[in-house]
Image: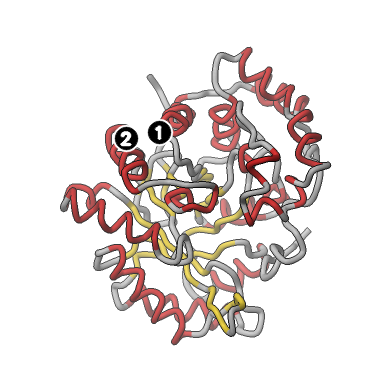
Amino acid sequence: MPRHPDRLLGPDGPLVFPLGIGTMSFTPFYGPVTEDEAFAILDAAMDHGVNHLDSANIYGSGLAETIIGRYIARNGASAREFFSIATKAGFDRENGNSVIRNDAAHLTEQLDGSLQRLGVEQIDLFYIHRRDPAIPIEDVAGTLKGFVEAGKIRGFGFSEIAPSSLHKAQAVHPVAAIQSEYSLSSRNPDLGMVQATKALGATMVAFSPVGRSLLTDRPISGDRVNDLPFLSVNPRFSPDNLPANIAAAAGFRALAADMGMPSARLAIAWLLHQGDHVLPIPGTRSLDHFMEMVPAAEVMLGADDLAAIDQVLPPGWAYGDRYSEKQWNAVERYC
């Protein structure tokens, strides 16, 4: 069956499957998970050609990277050759508080820790998780360029920055990827970043592509939200907004059912039609959910299909901001 072509991860590659795996779900961020469950998803990924893993040093305080490292160690060179691995750094702790650090000493230390946990000699894509506005992004790009020249990383990127910052970094060294929340419920990248990454040959990596469950057939319940520190203070999952968002997305769930597919698959398929440089990275603790999403790479939507999706979920349909004021910390708002 025909499918969307592989994506270039940056102007010089590597080529990766049209969707990757966000590995935050390998940690208890959204609920309990075991290493065996994470390994089952990685096994399925290898079986189905899904070869990009997107992680971060703060996911479970290094747990997600450690799990990936253990999996690679168990499966040997074939697993390392198969997977493209991305990870991120830029957060630190001071006096019990989270702070942003982009200085060369911190990034070097954190990169070395990630290499050790992953058990690899080179990371394919190393992101700055959040920007420190006190350090010019050109200086940060210079540090990352040094990591490329040292062979520690193949390419680098940034998470949640503005197009203007991307252009400044690009002037120092080609930027391989920009990671932003991007989905039918969070379409801000359409207002500049999708276009800027396309023009520069960078990959637009879309995290939370199913809207933290709002774009699935099984949206999270209010009871579960109360047990999750991130979602419990997120405006879209407040006691008033969550029921409104679930109701607002009912038409999308019905449309997906009429088209003969799970809602999550259709949500990811929509992203794949926003550009051949867009790479969704859904995360899940469930093998069944993973297998619902992978066939999105084979879903070809026509103009009428895309128009129908826009009709049931027009831009701006979601109730509540995508982040609380605290969660917006160090995210560059450009529109």
C-alpha span from label 2 to label 1: 8 Å
Q: Residue at x 22, y 51 (%)?
A: 81
Is residue 247 something one can see in this rendering? yes
Q: Amino acid at mark 1?
A: Leu
Q: Position of residue 9 (x, y in %)?
A: 42, 52
Q: Position of residue 256 (x, y in %)?
A: 62, 20
Q: Residues within 10 Å of mark 1 (few under 14, many from 20)?
A: some
Q: Is residue 228 left or right of residue 76?
A: right
Query: 24 or 158, which is in the foreground?
Result: 24
Q: Is residue 276 left or right of residue 117?
A: right
Query: 75 or 311, which is in the foreground?
Result: 75
Q: Residues within 10 Å of mark 2 (few under 14, many from 20)?
A: some
Query: 29 or 179, which is in the foreground?
Result: 29
Vertical side of 301 occupied by 34: above or below: below
Q: Earlier in the sequence, mark 2 or mark 1?
A: 2
Q: Residue furthest bottom?
A: 105
Numbered circles on residues, count: 2
Vertical side of 150 occupied by 82: above or below: above
SS of the residue at dot 2?
helix
* Marks 2,1: beta carbons within 8 A: yes
User: According to the image, label 1 marks what residue?
Assistant: 287
User: According to the image, label 2 marks what residue?
Assistant: 44
Q: Residue at x 40, y 65 (%)?
A: 62
Q: Position of residue 277 (x, y in %)?
A: 51, 46
